[in-house]
Image: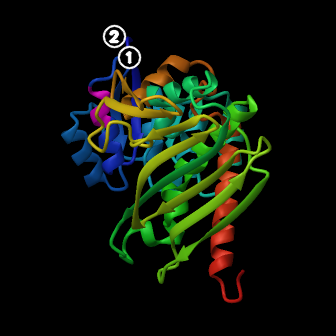
Amino acid sequence: MKDKLNWGIIGTGRVAADFARALQAAETGRVVSAVGSTPAQTQAFAAEWRLPGAPESLAALVGDPAVEAVYVATPHPWHEEHATAAIRAHKAVLCEKPLTMNAASAGRVIEAARAEGVFLMEAFMYRCHPLTAEVLSRLRDGAIGRVHHVSATFGFRARRDPASRLYDPALGGGAILDVGGYPMSFARLIAGVAEGRPFAEPVSFHGHGHVGPLGADELASALLRFASGMTASLTCAVHHDAGMSVQIFGEDGKMVLPHPWIPGGKAQGTETELTVFRDGRAPETIAVRARAATYGLEAELVAATLPALEARWPAMTWADTLGNMRALDAWLAAVHADAAPGGA
């Protein structure tokens, strides 16, 4: 029965489990195989999710003709290797954010996808959710007038642990690579609306932050300015509970998103909302309902996009991913320069 896209998962951690859970209810996809870093992890994951495939290696998973698309859910430093292996095997690839550790690495993966003619998308879930489409539609319709400023945060407090990936720079730890891509990509998206483009890059950028005793950026902030005159203030953290929120300020009011990055909350619910505050009017709260959990929405978007190579806007295109990675590179460089002896 070929009514669904067959997925293989590289990785067997929490995110991989969330993806497998979401696809149990997906209309256009199903998980048929997964591979972990050890045979025991692979077997346990396959048993938990009742998968027909428990391959012995990465090569076996991407080489399996039953697997048509691959979800890369491993830690950041392995994304390039794992995504490229799937691309070389001509499997469509959905890769967790950030696509790789830096823009140069992301460029190599994208060039591989271009050369092989294979679909590739960086998995920023919120870009696939109807909440984002609702925000963009209302902004384009002038709900708050000309957009002047975006304030976006994504920060949580995790125990400072030398064994944790979050605090190991070699494993992509730190706030900017772990969650900073969310506010950065959102600001660039809204700046694009202000300029009549899919996204926009900042014309000026100032980044600061705190690098903790383990060498990871534990808290980071950035101020951006775009060609339209729109500005943005961004905050991300792994050692401070900065919360998750977005405010978009326009000439005639503001728009507030209380759950911008994980619409529906951590339980992956299907209902969320946004509120529009406009001069002279009562606040308007707009309920937004998704047909599936956010991981399921990503998978369904991939299935709907094939055989095209890039996702439809506002999901992450290759150019958008590269621009975002360059901005994260600059943010990381600024924060670590700031923390260095004699830094600005």
Amino acid identity at mark 2: Met
Q: Is residue 306 magenta?
A: no
User: At x 54% / y 56%, what residue is drawn?
Assistant: 180
Colouring mode (rainbow / by chain / secondary structure / one colour)? rainbow
Q: Secondary structure at mark 1?
A: loop
Give the label, 1 or 2, closer to the camera. 1
Q: Which residues are magenta?
A: 20-24
Query: Is-magenta flag for residue 21?
Result: yes
- For the point 60% across and 24% down, which residue is it? 312
- How far across and how far down the image is residue 243, in percent? 40, 56
Q: Quadrant of residue 46?
A: top left
Looking at the picture, how far across and down is residue 277, in whole percent? 48, 35
Q: Which residue lies at the image location 54% right of the left edge and 77% below the top edge? A: 211
Q: Front-most of 273 and 282?
A: 282
For the residue marked with disc 1, what is the amino acid?
Lys
Q: Is residue 98 at all visible to an observer of this figure? A: no
Q: Which residue is mark 2?
A: 1
Q: Say whether residue 99 is left or right of residue 38.
A: right
* Residue 4 image label: 1
